[in-house]
Image (cartoon, rainbow, N blue to C red):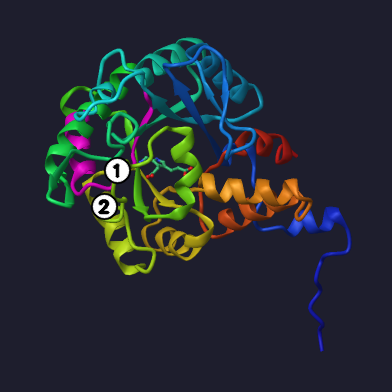
């Protein structure tokens, strides 16, 4: 009887037959730019992650390119917040200014802009809210109008991809239509298509200064119990014109990631989110896991499960760790 060979005898042999080989091109680095600072400011719950000044973000984009990354994802922290998220779609808003500055210095980097209102709303929700007694509603269509303005202003400022992360219904179609009508038919849409209401976004809300001041996001983000619904959400976004679809968070939703990639065959992204980052950092600081080995195992698993693109706060380090 022929015995199966395992081909594991040496590192070179293992490399030769390895199915999943992460490379610097797989990773996207999220960056936070704040109008309120002129020195970088550390995020307490995310060691190694900073809010950056306008100059800082340009330097960081260049650094990302220099280590071999090809894409960044931008989040903005405005000077002022209000109830209409005015800063989100201002021509001279924080993200719009950052996009212009980055594209001037570093035109080859793929600039992805997060399109959401929560950082710009005084109440921290991702949309326009109405309060009825002790209930609040997020008004879907009023919110979509503002998201369209936001996405268009990002495209005008030079975004290569706009990435709506709000989870309102119908926003992908509305944004696609507005981009096309204004001559931005080459600007793509990376849709946060299956975005689950998650405890793992906690540290991000410190970084982006966007925690909801009342209630939570469960009326517009997905229930972690639902897989079929996630697939329907993704199908809708693709129908409406999404070029890339995202599953978020990453590791707890790896089954969704696999099914989305298998079923639709679209470029598929996974967002390894702030809480997932913070957990490994905390364990590594205590000496419980080896950071590099843990991160490489997670990223390889996400790729194996179908991620074409991985958004991660370790992108810079990963560019180095996966170069060879
Ligand atoms: C904005 C947005 C959030 C994240 C990305 N875009 C926060 C949220 O929905 O509460 C989370 C990213 C992370 O945790 O790393 N809506």
Q: Nearer the viewer, residue 232 or 83?
A: 83
Residue 300: x percent and y percent?
A: 64, 54
The part of the chain drawn in magenta is 159-179
Residue found at the far front of this picture: 133
Q: Quadrant of residue 171?
A: top left
Residue at 26 percent across and 14 percent down: it is: 91
Classify the position of ligand 1 by quadrant: top left, top right, bottom left or bottom right: top left
- Is the CB–ligand 1 distance for label 1 below 8 Å? yes
In the displayed structure image, the side of residue 39 where residue 149 appears, left or right:
left
Quick one: quadrant of the C terminus?
top right
The residue identified by callout 1 is 166
Residue 85: x percent and y percent?
A: 24, 28
Magenta stretch contains residue 169: yes
Q: Which mark is residue 220?
A: 2
**Lower position in the chain sequence, tag 2 or tag 1:** 1
- Whether residue 158 is visible here, answered yes or no, is no
Residue at 36 percent across and 46 percent down: it is: 192
Residue 278: x percent and y percent?
A: 60, 46
Residue found at the far right of this picture: 10
Quick one: quadrant of the N terminus?
bottom right
- Identify whether 304 is placed above or below 55: below
């Amino acid at each position: 009887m022929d015995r199966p060979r395992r081909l594991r005898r040496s590192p070179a042999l293992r490399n030769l037959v390895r199915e999943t080989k992460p490379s610097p091109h797989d990773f996207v680095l999220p960056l936070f730019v704040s109008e309120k600072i002129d020195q970088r400011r550390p995020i307490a719950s995310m060691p190694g992650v900073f809010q950056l000044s306008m100059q800082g973000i340009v330097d960081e984009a260049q650094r990302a390119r220099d280590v071999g990354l090809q894409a960044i994802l931008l989040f903005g922290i405005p000077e002022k917040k209000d109830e209409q998220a005015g800063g989100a779609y201002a021509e001279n808003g924080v993200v719009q200014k950052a996009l212009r500055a980055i594209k001037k210095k570093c035109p080859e980097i793929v600039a992805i802009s997060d399109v959401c209102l929560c950082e710009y709303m005084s109440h921290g929700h991702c949309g326009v809210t109405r309060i009825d007694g002790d209930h609040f509603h997020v008004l879907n269509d009023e919110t979509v109008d503002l998201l369209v303005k936001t996405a268009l202003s990002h495209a005008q400022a030079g975004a290569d991809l706009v990435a709506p992360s709000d989870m309102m219904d119908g926003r992908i179609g509305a944004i696609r239509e507005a981009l096309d009508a204004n001559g931005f038919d080459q600007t793509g849409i990376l849709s946060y298509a299956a975005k689950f209401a998650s405890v793992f976004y906690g540290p991000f809300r410190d970084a982006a200064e966007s925690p909801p001041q009342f209630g939570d996001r469960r009326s517009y983000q997905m229930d972690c119990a639902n897989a079929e619904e996630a697939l329907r959400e993704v199908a809708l976004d693709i129908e409406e014109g999404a070029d890339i679809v995202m599953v978020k968070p990453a590791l707890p939703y790896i089954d969704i990631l696999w099914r989305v990639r298998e079923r639709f065959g679209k470029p598929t992204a996974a967002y390894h989110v702030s809480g997932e980052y913070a957990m490994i950092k905390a364990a590594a600081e205590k000496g419980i896991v080896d950071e590099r080995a843990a991160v490489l195992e997670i990223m390889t698993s996400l790729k194996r499960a179908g991620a074409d693109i991985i958004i991660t706060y370790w992108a810079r380090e990963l560019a180095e760790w996966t170069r060879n």
